[in-house]
Image (tube, rainbow, N blue to C red):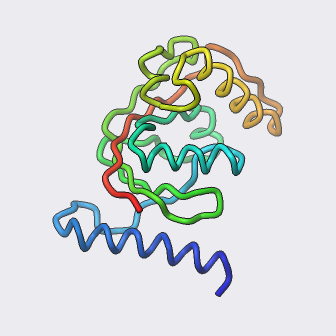
Amino acid sequence: MTSANKNKKSVESLWNDFLKDNPNNSIKKQPITYHFCDNEHDANECVELVVQGIKQASATSLWWYQKHQEPLPKIGDQHIITDWNGHARAIIEITKVTPKPYQEITHEFAEIEGEGDKSLEYWRRVHEAYYTREMQPYGKKFNEDMIIVCEYFKTIYKQ
């Protein structure tokens, strides 16, 4: 079995186990699956924080949603979170979505996002670097006025 098939099976298995344990879940169709971040170390660290219940928010640029023509998340959406290699580790449910300019991100949000030392300073440093890397191949530049889609979530199932 190839690793792609094995990882697909891990996603299907996690979702099916979740539905068995939660037969009244309003969503029956397998939700979108993804990993956080753009590198293996951070992706694996973030999914571990989700599994531990420490990471309860994420911050995607509005630019990313527009560039990839993806719908904005909404309350009640469920997502399967994987490690870098696509192994399913957790299911999250969106509880709140708040778009706001990068410069208005608060210490409270940085703490809920749960990465690094949970400080706003750390959050700004790593996210500015991330948004810069994300936009650079398209000739776009990070700026502090750009809108960040702050997604709050709860971990509803984990492996």
Question: In the figure, is residue 38 to the left or right of 81?
Answer: right
Residue 96 falls in image quadrant: top left
Left or right for 119, reference 27? right
Q: Residue at x 34, y 74 (%)?
A: 16
Which quadrant is the C terminus positioned in? bottom left
**Residue 55: x %, y % from top left:** 45, 38
Does residue 108 appear to the left or right of 143 in the view shown?
Answer: left
The location of residue 69, given as percent across then percent down, is: 58, 46
Q: Residue at x 73, y 27 (%)?
A: 129
Where is the N terminus found, in terms of image quarters?
bottom right
Q: Is 81 in front, or is 32? A: 81
- Residue at 58%, 57% (x, y): give it: 83
Q: Position of residue 114 (x, y in %)?
A: 48, 31
Residue 46's image quarter? top right
Q: Is residue 147 above or below residue 49?
A: above
Relative to 104, residue 5 above or below: below
Which residue is found at the position 42% from the left and 42% from the top? Answer: 73
Across and down, in percent, residue 137 comes to 82, 39
Residue 84 falls in which quadrant of the image? Answer: bottom right
Residue lying furthest left = 24
Q: Is residue 8 above or below residue 26?
A: below
How many numbered dots are placed on residues in this image? 0
